[in-house]
Image (cartoon, rainbow, N blue to C red):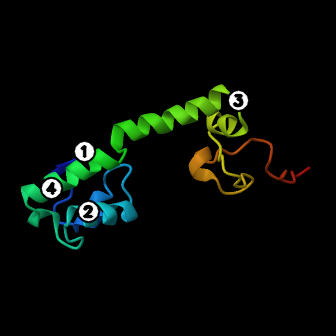
Amino acid sequence: MARISGVTIPAEKQVWVALTYVFGVGPKSSYDILANAKVEPTERVKNLTDAEIARIQDLINADYLVEGELQRIVSGNIKRLKDIKSYRGLRHAANLPSRGQRTKTNARTRRGKKSTVSGTAKKVASKT
């Protein structure tokens, strides 16, 4: 198993897919890295040589922000939005969607499991 930027990438997958397991590397940047490192994107990770893995690692270290460093920057940006009390910061603080999505319905992943409020159900007719 190969380790790139502190992440163990799966050995059975193609290299371009396996690189996307690193936070901060998507499909497009994965192809760009492999083109610069002169590695075939459809090759399996288990078939890579140590020299190829080292070239990939060197390119990522030189040109990309990945993993912990990128996560620190992203969380710092969100903290700054919260500190200046911008609209987006308030939405992050309230754990609500921050990009204009509706919340009357949907938004369950952001708002959490639905909790029913008492008193909203229809009154059942009682016998007299």
Please, what secondary structure does the residue beneath circle 1 have? Answer: loop
In which quadrant is the N terminus drawn?
bottom left
Badge 4 or badge 1: first in the primary sequence: 1
Nearer-N-terminus badge (2/3): 2
Position of residue 29 in the picture relative to residue 99 (left or right): left
Q: Nearer the viewer, mark 4 or mark 2?
A: 2
What is the distance, in whole Å, between disc 2 and disc 3 at their CAs? 42 Å
Label 4 Cα crowd, 10 Å radius (few <14 / some 14-19 / many 20+) = some
Badge 4 element: helix
Is residue 8 visible in the rendered image? The answer is: no
Examine the rendering and report whether any part of residue 10 can be seen: yes
Packing grade of label 3 (10 A; few <14, some 14-19, many >=20) is: few
Query: Alpha-carbon neighbours of circle 1 within 10 Å: few (<14), some, or many (≥20)?
Result: some
- Identity of the amino acid at label 4? Ile
Residue labelled with disc 1:
5
Q: Which residue is mark 3?
A: 85
In the drawing, what numbered circle is on residue 36? 2
Q: Looking at the rendered structure, which numbered label has been put on residue 53? A: 4
For marks 1 and 2, give the CA distance: 17 Å
